[in-house]
Image (cartoon, rainbow, N blue to C red):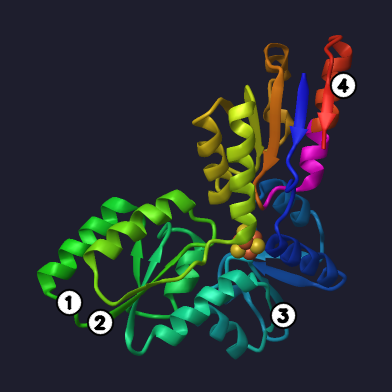
Amino acid sequence: MTIKISKYIGFCFGVSRVVNSVFKNSDKKIKILGEIVHNEILINKLKKNKNITFIEDVKEVRFGDTVVTRAHGEKNNILKHLVDKGAFLVDMTCPKVAAIQNIVEKSSRKNVFIIIGDKNHPEIISIVSRNDLSIIIDNLSSAKNFISDVKFKKKNFISRYIVAAQTTYDLEKYKEVCDFLKDNLENVEFKNTICGDILKRREEILENAPKSDLVIVIGSEKSSNTRNLFIIAQKFCKSILISNKKCFDFEILRSKSKIFLCSGASAMKETAEEFINSAKKYCLQNKLDLEIQR
Ligand code: SF4
């Protein structure tokens, strides 16, 4: 049996940046606003650090507090509130998310901004907070509803539309919605805002899942890019999404010969290494051949 390990296992650039910042600042008392990244193992580890307090509400911030914000970005009014309160703000919004926030802010005066993504995702909430006229489209069916509404209100031909995607949105679904909007709107400009890191992981799974009989995706179910990798892999072979080695039944290895192991952008490399070590131990104990390919 072979287990091929993804080239991109572990954190993306934006998640590494925020996690490093938390560790760098944790020699003093800091407050972290919300779920800093979608990784329960990491959050639980940080909660054990006496210098770190997780808060859900800006009301818990006092003058002089150091507050670290998440890679997904925060709503504009929350950032303003923190500054007004006299907090020392460590804004860890990923630069790729900040780039979309910029597009929205610049487009706010004369254009209608459309973001394609999950309306409940913190990134989308942070982006639309920058323009009251932003429109969120979740999928093709909400795009169809939007177009019927535009036609009903005869808004078409009046405005210019700028369309962008959540950084972790699925590329195929984005193209599908864009093609539909292209056919139904005039004066529309499409921005390519899906994160390059996400696209590389996607390409890699598209190349490897068809050659495998099992794909293991490490990450949180809350993470949209992790779920997307899992959904893609499922189209080709048996696929399992696990947050850590404890959730995995190693017995399944007995019936598999080609396994591909990858992770979402907010999963730790250590979690993958722990999984690999457990797989090695299981194979040794059960006299199974195992080759790890990196
Ligand atoms: S996935 Fe991309 S956009 Fe999201 S935090 Fe990571 S680097 Fe930034």
In this rendering, the label closer to the viewer, 2 or 3: 2
Query: Number of numbered discs present?
Result: 4
Residue 87 location in percent, x, y? 67, 84
Q: Would you place residue 95 above or below residue 214 in this image?
A: below
Q: Residues within 10 Å of mark 2 (few under 14, many from 20)?
A: some
Identify residue for label 4. Answer: 281
Which quadrant would the N terminus be assigned to in this image?
Answer: top right
- Gap in Å between the C-alphas at discs 4 and 1? 63 Å
In this rendering, the label closer to the viewer, 3 or 1: 1
Q: Quadrant of residue 178?
A: bottom left
- Gap in Å between the C-alphas at discs 2 and 3? 43 Å
Q: Is residue 150 left or right of residue 122?
A: left
Q: Residues within 10 Å of mark 4 (few under 14, many from 20)?
A: few
Please state the quadrant of the image where ligand 1 appears. Answer: bottom right
Q: Would you place residue 199 above or below residue 70 in this image?
A: above
- As drawn, the label of residue 159 is 2
Q: Which residues are magenta?
A: 266-275
Identify residue for label 3. Answer: 65
User: What secondary structure do most residues of the magenta stretch adopt?
Assistant: helix
Is the residue marked 2 within 8 Å of ligand 1, measured from its CB? no
Q: Is residue 268 left or right of residue 91?
A: right
- Specify the amino acid type for callout 2: Ser
Identify residue for label 1. Answer: 155
Residue 131 counted in the magenta span: no
Rendered residue at 60%/32% (across/down): 209
Who is closer to the viewer here, 64 or 12?
A: 12
- Specify the amino acid type for callout 4: Lys
Rendered residue at 74%/55% (across/down): 47
